[in-house]
Amino acid sequence: MGTKVIVHGGCFPCPPWHGLKEIPLKQPSIYLPHGGGPCFFMDPPSDEPDRWVAMEAYLRSLPDRLPGRPDALLVISAHWEKSRPTVLSSARPGLLFDYYGFPANTYHLTWPAPGAPALASRVRALLASAGIESDEDASRDYDHGVFIPLKVAFPDADIPVLQLSLQAGLDPARHIAIGRAIKSLRDENVAILGSGLSFHNLRAFGDPRAIAPAVDFDRWLTEVLCDGPIGERELELAQWSQAPGARICHPREEHLLPLMVAAGAASGEPGHHAFQGTIWGMAVSAYHFG
């Protein structure tokens, strides 16, 4: 387990007979952008080779932004919805190439990160304690909302990963509650990652009429998550569709809902605006908690 060492009783220097005590690292919860399809690995690259450079640099910086090496990564991807929250309980998931029309090389990527079956059981127990019914799936593979950003951030694929689905219906308050239920995992050296995109309207990418609404929505998110009263954050997020530009940015909210889980897992903690960039002119952001 990733730990940090503290001396007994705060004394310094500490006599050897006092011994040392180890406590688990507390990991953050994070809402990160996972880009578009296999955008960071295309050969040939996209028509604008620098389009994904800033986002890729942010993802590469993730390990250095953590307090230490996590024992596991719990990832909520925009690309998996089930009738009940479902954990991917396989010990060795493969990759699910759930994107279409990209260069041939992107269908031969590898990222053999181990699964986390024991953590899957722990997550289900925490959800049950919060009155949330759940399921598990031992046959599904990591979708691209998991392996694409994490192949950039953790290329060695040596940290166990557990994927948790969204819940069909996409109720924001429900996903905030799911985050609150699993919050204690952060104290057990598990990083919680919500993988989505803060602007996700495929028809509006490149449309200049959507630039201002994207800026407005990005500004609203940052105010609510980082600058506004923490006690009002969950209520504001539950009513996200009333925010400026909300439905222009998210005609369907599956790419925003991982944020609700990440925010719920940081209930009472301020957010940090960790990344801000643009793709096709649209504002996109990442937020860290803790």
Image (spheres, rainbow, N blue to C red):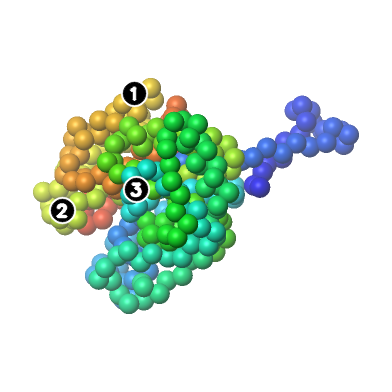
Q: Which mark is residue 128?
A: none
Q: Nearer the viewer, mark 3 or mark 2?
A: 3
Query: Please, what secondary structure does the residue beneath circle 2 have?
Result: loop
Q: Looking at the image, which residue is at 35% across and 66% down?
A: 97
> Residue flagged by tag 1: what amino acid is it?
Glu
- Give the x, y percent position of residue 115: 53, 57
Query: Please, what secondary structure does the residue beneath circle 1 have?
Result: helix
Question: Which comes before the other along the chain, label 3 or label 2?
Answer: 3
Q: CA distance from mark 3 to mark 2?
A: 27 Å
Query: Please, what secondary structure does the residue beneath circle 3 have?
Result: strand
Are the residues at dot 1 and dot 2 in contact (C-beta closer than 8 Å)? no
Indicate the quadrant where residue 107 lies: bottom left
Q: Looking at the image, which residue is at 34% across and 23% down?
A: 232
Q: CA distance from mark 1 to mark 2?
A: 30 Å
Q: Residues within 10 Å of mark 2 (few under 14, many from 20)?
A: some
Q: Which residue is mark 2?
A: 204
- Residue 290 in the figure: left or right of residue 54: right
Q: Which residue is mark 1?
A: 232
Question: Which comes before the other along the chain, label 3 or label 1?
Answer: 3
Q: Looking at the image, which residue is at 68% across and 37% down?
A: 23
Indicate the quadrant where residue 137 lies: bottom left
Q: Which residue is mark 3?
A: 82
